[in-house]
Amino acid sequence: MHTGKRLAGAVVAAGVSLLVVSACGSGGSSNNGKTVSSSFADCATKPNTCNSGDTKSGGTFTFTIEKTIDNWNQNDGDGNTQDFGEVLDGVLPSVFNGQPDLGPALNTDLVTSAQQTSANPQTIVYKINPKAVWDDGTPVTADDFVYAWKTQNGKDCKDCNAASTSGYDQMKSVTGSDNGKTVTVVYDTPFTDWKQPFGPLYPAHIAQQHGDLAASWKWFGENPVNYSAGPYKISDYQKDVSVTEVPNPKWWGKKPSLDKLVFRIITDQNQEVPALQNNEVQAIYPQPNQDLVNQVKALAPNVQYTLGKGLTWEHLDLNLKNKFLADKTLRQAVFTAVNRQAIIDKTVGQFAPGIKPLNNHNFMPGQAGYKDTVTASGAGNGDIEKAKKLLTDAGYKGVGTALTTAAGEPVTMRISYTIGNTLRQASAELFQNEMQQLGIKVTITPIQSLGKTLSAGDFDAIIYAWVGTPFPFAGAVQIWTEAGGSDYGHWSNPQADALTKQAASESDLKKATDLLNQADQMLSNDYYSLPLFQKPTFLAVYSQFANIRDNATNVGPAYNDGEWGLRASAK
Amino acid sequence: MLAYVIRRIFVSIPILIGSTILVFIMVKFSGDPLEGLKMRNPPPPRQTILNEEHRLRLDKPVWEQYWLWLKGLVLHGDFGPSVHGNINIGHELGDRLFVTLRLVVLSVLIALIFAVITGVVSAVKQYSATDYSFTFLGFLFLAMPSFWFAILLKSAGIAYNQATGTEAFFTIGEKSVLLTDDSGWGQFKDIAGHMVLPTISLALISYAAWSRFQRASMLEVLNSDYVRLARAKGLRSRQVLVRHALRTALIPLTTVTALDIAALLGGAVITEMVFQWHGLGDYLLRSIRDHDAYAMMGWLLVSAIIVIVFNLIADLLYSVLDPRIRYE
């Protein structure tokens, strides 16, 4: 009897142990240094076509998004998230879409051409595809373009909470002709990023049924999208859980091969890999970390993955209002001592070996305008001796021990990062160590609110991120010019401001790129903001699905979801 | 008794108001609800930020923001504007309370049944192998961080699915988005497959503590004079245990359970997060992340009311279960 009880106890204990072991076993193997698995092997050289394959019809594919849908109007400030954008990629059309190679590509299903016909005044003519219709049979016309313009130009509808007025606010007129199938846009002042506006388009004929501009804008935000001019239409929405899409019967382009496409919402990143492993979702696109990458590696060969370079880029900024950092020589010494490769090695480099220091503030490697403006300035290479010499030559005392100004005032500073961000914490610790070698005492200051800290200018050095875009010119004016609104570190360079503004108002893209890179060079030479690295992206997909690939632009991997499908060879 | 209940309810009102003031001030100084919007690249137009500041009443002094919130709540049942303009905080709290209730009720029932059984068996068979086994398990579950245990359960569920080639257990959500078998049995299997792991996860946390309570309470009663007397009178062992000892020994557990249920209803935060159930706990996390001040206030209010009500229930249960206690 007693033996039986002991046995029962032992069985229970063993059961618990088994749970522990089974959980630990799923942790995965160690990092083997790869950044892709076989399906994605050619993504580095052929980003727009890798993981291609013939598909067969049928099947359901579930893609994970991380944010709930709180507003159905993607052009509204509240609805303008990348996650929701992915849901709409196959439903509402845009004139240009960001591609995996970070360049914009014309959506020829929507427009057969979009061309600048005049430089002065800048005039763009869009020819709408004659076959393009909304799923109720109403043709896509210039009215849809006019509606986008009027709701987002910041003038005709003050109550439309546009996520951005960029470009629309410079348009003088948007007019339709040719029975609404030709749209002519005339700009007041040239807008370099003219490929950015008109996406996603909302149907003007449905807007008309719901009041004036402001009322219809609100209606679009409040009601699930039950209209479509893309390969898919939304068939079901479960609040905070999922959006299900089915092929749009009125779609005039190539028919999607999937029966159903589901966007599943998982708001805690840590729960994505178990859901993938349990086949509850077939693809995840989380911000990677070492654990997550290793867990996915353990799911091979059923699950394939790729680590790419994202458009979100970390940078170290200095506050020029700080009495010490107002001195350019000190800033130069600080940036010269920072070793960006060491920061990468200690953070993202541990699971994404391909990440390199970033050398431009506006263009990312791979984008047409990318040019190294940083290396020549000597910043970011961790050259402590050179930094020391700069300080000594400038009359600083106590170089390498306890740095003081020539007047004898000890040089100290804070470095701030958002609390809980381990990547930035590690970067801040390295920075502290490097500054210590110059004799600068640095206090690491975790902050609760990045926005408040930046707005108040309550920092000396700070690490945070900007998100790059295929359309960098308008954003550059807002981020880098003195009156742009986001010049939190109070960098002032009238010449660079003029160049940046001129770059954003060019009708010649090549000239605009040159101008922006000239301004970028001045920014680097002033040692105000040091780009560190691009954060990696991470896509993991079941291998029986083809044509899904990473796209780091704001449209995300779902940019081509109409092509996703079961491989023809899949069982 | 009724007078006592009414008095307790009235006393609760200043407590509630005090706690809301405190939380409102803390939330207001914790971060900018429009930070996410302001940090976008390209940044949103100034007009959008101004519109949002006005809608969220950020253009008014803090005391006025609080007063408007309180006035709206008392006069119109309006919980205030959410950071997400389309979300009605009152509806959200109602929907989510129901989700949390579904999770909590079943797990509390399971935890209670097992806690009482193992607590009684442990007490009756004190220092036996069974008692040691239950004690070991009780302390093991007490010591395990709940998030870790939830992850273990998930892994075990996945391992079972893979070993058997079935889809018995699900790791996220309350039900499948697309059902392959939509018969009654198919739906039941699907819901059960989603509920098993989170329910066990939540139940075991409560079970561990409650079984220890029940064991201690049962031991105390078993060693009391009146139980000895009952035995001496020749009553059957089962009658002594169930009628005399257990009824008395349930009193402490009843009150502890009432208080714990209040805490669980406030949000089984970790369980909901790990298993992606969109209940009150999930809403709290989301509100904190979004600096959604009025959503946090709403959550606090609902949780505080639940705590106050269940405290009252616990006190009243005392008087029901123990005839020596009477409230005037």
Image: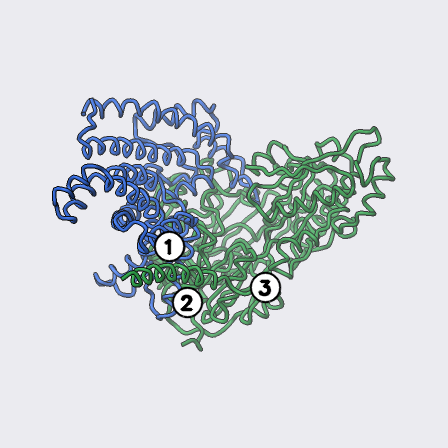
In the picture, which chain is blue? Answer: B
Q: Nearer the viewer, mark 1 or mark 2?
A: 1
Which image quadrant is residue A493 in? top right
The subunit carrying tag 3 is: A
The subunit carrying tag 1 is: A
Q: Nearer the viewer, mark 1 or mark 3?
A: 3
Q: Is residue B146 left or right of residue A342?
A: left
Label 1 SS: strand
Q: Which percent across, then down, holds residue A240? A: 37, 49
Q: Residue A242 shows which numbered tag?
A: 1
Label 3 SS: loop
Which quadrant is home to the N terminus of chain A? bottom left
Q: Residue A256 shows which numbered tag?
A: 2
Query: In this orientation, which residue lies closer to the viewer: B64 or A10?
Result: A10
Q: Is residue A143 visible?
A: no
- The kind of residue tagged 3 is Asn
- The kind of residue tagged 2 is Pro
Q: Which percent across, then down, holds residue A304? A: 51, 67
Q: Are marks 1 and 2 in contact (CB under 8 Å)?
A: no
Whether labels 1 and 3 share one chain = yes
Q: Which percent across, then down, holds residue B312? A: 26, 30
Q: Are marks 1 and 3 in contact (CB under 8 Å)?
A: no
Q: Residue A430 shows which numbered tag?
A: none
Please name the residue that numbered disc 3 is placed on: A31
Q: Is residue B92 left or right of residue B232?
A: right
For the residues marked 1 and 2, what is the alpha-carbon distance in whole angstroms? 20 Å
Figure colour of chain A? green
Q: Residues within 10 Å of mark 3 (few under 14, many from 20)?
A: some
